[in-house]
Amino acid sequence: MDEIITILSAQGFRCAHYGWSHAPAGDYVVWAEDGANDLGADDHHVEHVTQGTLDLFTRDDSGTPRTTIEAALDGRCAWYLNSIQFEEDTGYIHYEWIWEI
Amino acid sequence: MAKIEFPDFDVYVKQLKQLGADIDGVIKYASYDAAGMVADAIKANTPVDSGDLRESLVLTTYKNENGFIHTKVMFDGYDSRGVPNAIKARVLESGNSTHRKHPFIRPAVNRVRSSAIKSMENQLDKKINELMKGS
């Protein structure tokens, strides 16, 4: 994930691991590991897989931030877009991706 | 010329017909324990504040929708402050710009998925064997 976060940071996304003590006023990204999805065979963990989430909070409804983030994820991890939610009280569009490495 | 004999063919056909007639019940039976395993894993992972959320986790009755037999594990009702438990669970699972996420559903499902599928396979084999022998 470090490589992905480096790419996103270089493209202007403000990124934090696990969360912000004080979230920025504008758009931002939060990423976190939250579990495993190892491949087991004959009582052995033959492949170690870490699973986690990457969240984007943006007020840009053009879809460009989504495209940029998915381009950074693509080919670097297994991922899917889990949800898109609109927060009426803050105006944020909240994208949530699940990733595995 | 080769000759293949299939003795008691009518018995076999009768067994298959019986299995076909009982298949909904067989699938419900096979998935019952697995659904419980998933629900228990989520319940054990549910953050506890008042305990309302954990207690609200229920399994719905089985439904057959276009041949797809399923049950749902869901957070039902409202907490003591009138907040829908499903929304509370959603905010905990995915977070929002004002609440940090605490994923507890997906990790629980990941942990129990393999054993739940294995349980369904075992129960399915067991029930089909019982029906085929009993016909």
Image (tube, coloured by chain):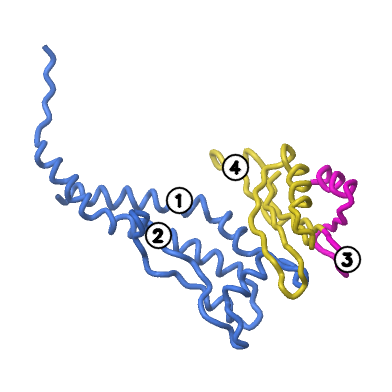
Chain colours: A yellow, B blue
The magenta segment is: A1-28
Above or below, B123 relative to A89: above
Secondary structure at badge 3 equals: loop
Q: Nearer the viewer, residue B125 or B72?
A: B72
Write down the chain letter for disc 4: A
Write down the chain letter for disc 1: B
Q: Residue A89 location in percent, x, y?
A: 74, 75
For the point 29% across and 55% down, which residue is it? Answer: B26
Residue type at mark 2: give it: His
Q: Residue under circle 4?
A: A39
Circle nearer the viewer, 1 or 3: 3
For the point 14% across and 41% down, which residue is it? Answer: B13
For the point 40% across and 60% down, which residue is it? Answer: B70
Q: Nearer the viewer, residue A14 or B27?
A: A14
Estimate the spatial distance between the alpha carbons at disc 3 and disc 2, rounded to whole Å.
43 Å
Give me the disc on residue B70.
2
Q: Nearer the viewer, residue B123 or B97?
A: B97
Residue type at mark 1: give it: Ile
For the residues beneath circles 2 and 4, the answer to whether they share a chain is no
Q: Earlier in the sequence, mark 1 or mark 2?
A: 2
Secondary structure at badge 1 equals: helix
Give me the disc on residue B90.
none
Secondary structure at badge 4 equals: strand
Q: Is residue A19 shown left or right of residue A95?
A: right
Residue type at mark 4: give it: Leu
Q: Residue B34 location in percent, x, y?
A: 44, 58
Residue A93 picture quarter: bottom right
Residue A47 picture quarter: top right
Q: Residue under circle 1?
A: B117
Q: Residue under circle 3?
A: A24
Secondary structure at badge 2 equals: strand
